[in-house]
Every structure is written in C-alpha cells, then in structure tokens.
Amino acid sequence: MERLPAATTAPAAPALAAPVPVPITAPVAPAAPPVTEMNTERPVSLKPNALIGLQEQTDIWERIRRGFAMPDLDNDLVRNREQWYASRPDYMLRMTERSRPYLFHIVEELERRNMPMELALLPFIESAFNPQAVSSAKAAGMWQFMPATGKYFDLKQNLFRDERRDVLESTRAALDYLQKLYTLFGDWHLALAAYNWGEGSVGRALARNKAQGLPLTYSDLRMPNETRFYVPKLQAVKNIVAQPEAFNTELPLIQNHPYFKSVAIERDIDVAMAAKLANVSLEDFKALNPAMNRPVILAAGTPHILLPWDNATVFETNLQARPERRLSRWTAWQAPRTMGAEEVAKQVGMSAEQLRSVNGIPARMLVKAGSTLLVPRQGKLDNDVTEHLADNGHLLLAPEVVLRKIMVKARAGDTLARLASRHGVSAANVADWNRLKPNVTLSNGQTLAIYVPAKASRKATKSSPRRTEPQRSKVAARPSKAASKR
C-alpha cells in the first residue's frame, strides 16, 4: 500500500486472509530531520516488570512504566528523536497535558487485554493526543483511522457522528487492529510498522528480505522514511517517560484513577445543553465527546456521553429535574425531492442562511432527494430522531442550475411523466411548477410551464416528434429567482 501523509491537527476482525484494509496514517509530529550525532551517549535504564506490585502506583506514569513489555530499540534514529522531543519541553508539556482525560482508560484497556503498555503512548505519535486531529488524507481521531479502515473495524461515520474520533470506540478499534497485526507478524515492531504503513506493505517487505536472504526484523526492512522513524519515535517517548529527569523533562501529575464516567441519555439533547447541565465548559465537554458532527446528540445513535467523574452526578441530578422539558432544539428531516436551500428553509421554518450553516450546505448547491437535514423542532417536526436516521442519515448535494422558463403544450395521450421526459426534467417538478397533482390527466393542447437550463437552445427544448429528443439533464434543478421573473 502507498504510505499516506502525516496527520495535522485541527482548531477536528475478520480472518487474516481477508483483504487488507486501508492503513491508518502516521503522526502529527513534523517530518524527521537528518540524523545527527548526540553530544554524549546517555543510555536509558528502563524499570523492569519485576517491580510490579512492590510499591504503590501513585500516578498513571508509574503504572505505564511498570507495564512496559516490548523489546527496546536502540539506534541513532532513537537518539535523534530523543533529542527532538527533549529540545521541545513546551510541546511535550502540551501533549502530555492533552492526554490527561484519556490515559487512564487506555491503560485499563491495555491491562485488560494483556497488551504492552508502550501502546498507551502511541497516540502521542499519531495525533499528539488530539481527538479532533485530521490528516491531509482524511484520517481522523487520536488513533488516526482512515475512513475505510474505520468502517472495517465498525466505527460508524455518518451525518451526525464520526466514531473515529470517539474516545471509547476508537480506542477499542485501535487495540483490535494492533492485536490483529501482532497475531499476523508475531513481533510488536513489525505490528507497529504495519499500523503506520499497512500490513500488505510490511508483508511484501518481509517477502523481499526473505527472498534475498536478509534478516526479517523491523530495522532491516526497506521502508518509507515516515515508517523508518515511526518505532524510534515511540521508543524515544518511552525512554523519556521512563526517566524524564534524564532528558530534563517534567511530566504533569496525572492521577491513577478514572477521569471520566459514561452516563446514559434517553432523549436527544443539544451539545450546549448537555455541557450546561453537567456544569462543564463546552470545550471540556467536546474534548470527551469529540465524535459529534452536529450541535445535537441523538440518543438513538449515541446512548451514552462521557463526563468528568464528579460532573456526571451533577448532570444526572439536573437532568432528573427536567423530566418533561425539551432538551434539544433540533430534529432530523428528509428531503422528499431535490430542492434548493431557500425552498427547504421555507418548509421547515428557518432562514436559508441558518439552514446552510447548521448543515454545511455551500451556496448555489441543491439538496438531493432523500438527504437528511438538521431542522428546528416545531409543529409536526417535534420528535426525537429515529435510530434509522441516526445511523444512516446522509446529505447529498448537487450544483444548482440556473433555469429559464418555457411554455409547452401537451399532446394527445401525454402524461406528466411523458411530457417531463421529453424535456429532460422530472414529473414531480413539472407538477410542482404548475401546481398540479402528480396523477393529473392532461388534455390535448394544455399549456404548461417548464424550466430548463438557461444555456439550452430553444430548438432543443421545443423539439417536435420528428426531431431527436433532447438529452435528459443529469442534474435536477429548480427555477432561480431570475428565471421566475421572466
């Protein structure tokens, strides 16, 4: 597989013989400079697993150190990355502070699965522990899943949420993937290389070495520069966490207890309302619930939210005090046909500007039939979103076409469908333009208004039975304001 570009941050298993999924992309850290010699050799002595249980684990870093289980990599690339991180104390502090809400959960999951604790440090390399990180290749989340790989590991991605950014689901999927890769290669360094480069690429590199009689270790494979530095980066962070004082680095105190608690929700609730009821800032709420694509959390698709441990009780108490009060201003609405934003806005009782802003609709774009839109709850549209829409809602857009109005006459035996087909438009649009019922019977010579693309020639649109009918337009359209004046 081709190596994908490194991630940049935003202000956002089947049988082993199955087809290889798209690889997860690589980290946020800048491209590696040429290897330079360290002024002094500074070997790092890591704490052995034999210390486990001999003293109290006072913070999460100590617990992580005691769980180190991978073989160490010791080469010039590791020294280079140690120097890079150690020379950037502000970056290291920001990155480690950002990990505070997530580390305990990841450590718990690794221990439950009996996996090496070095993997708790992998999001430092992938995304600098930013769950909103998005790469130029569209990988997302702190574990940097590509869309196809996310779907392969059952991470839902739809109009309302992207579980590649979800704290619990993305961690589950990442550890599933890493376990699968270790089972496949039997070596953690090779598994990590495959996580970055793709298992197919690593498999082919191993086959080349084997054919040439070369060693089959990570350090001996021919690989892209990004993957060449991938394990050294993790080893460098491991060494710094093991002995921060040796690198003049200070790690923030992160207590060895849960940071967040999962709380059930049974009704749709606005993101801002949930943060208010929990008495947390909107920024802190989104840091724990980064998967939301819209300003509302749909209970049918996201039945739990994460809250800081103490605030979970506050939220539950405040929620119980509002048993009958509406918690969300929004619901979902499906477009019955292809429509412009102005027409949709009029039907659902909001301005076109607000409709475009909330739903991410660019100017001069039509909303295609079947699309799901977020609209205000009012009148008939005052229900929580169904599970089907919460899981399958999608938005499809098409370029808006400027139309001009022509008048045509129905022929004997014409139906709306036949007349519409002759002019490359839909029967539903013809009925709408002329305020007719869809099953209306047309009379011979009846005059109807038809809107066609402004660039279409009159000869094409006024064809007779003996001429070739115009090609059907591939884009459904509506009359523009200019067309309606003509």
Image (spheres, grey):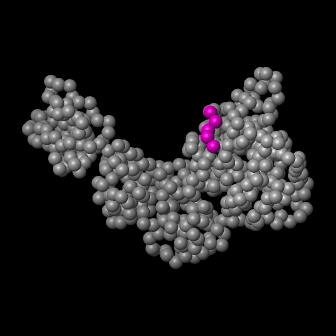
Residue sitting farthest toward the bottom? 321
Up-down: is 438 above or below 106?
above
Of 405 and 225, nearer the camera is 225
Residue at the image position 74 percent from the left and 26 percent from the top = 207
Residue 425 in sight from this viewpoint: yes
Q: Kindly identify the residue that appears in the image at 63 percent across and 55 percent down.
A: 130
The reply to whether residue 140 is visible in this rendering is no
Which residues lie in the magenta part? Answer: 2-6
Q: Residue furthest front?
A: 39
**Quadrant for the N terminus in the image:** top right
Q: Position of residue 126 (x, y in %)?
A: 67, 48
Query: Quick check: 427 left or right of 208?
Result: left
The residue shown at (62%, 46%) is: 7
Give the x, y percent position of residue 444: 9, 37
Does the stretch in magenta take in 361? no
Image location of residue 349, percent across then percent down: 32, 62
Horizontal side of residue 355 vs 191, given as left or right: left
21 on left or right of 418? right
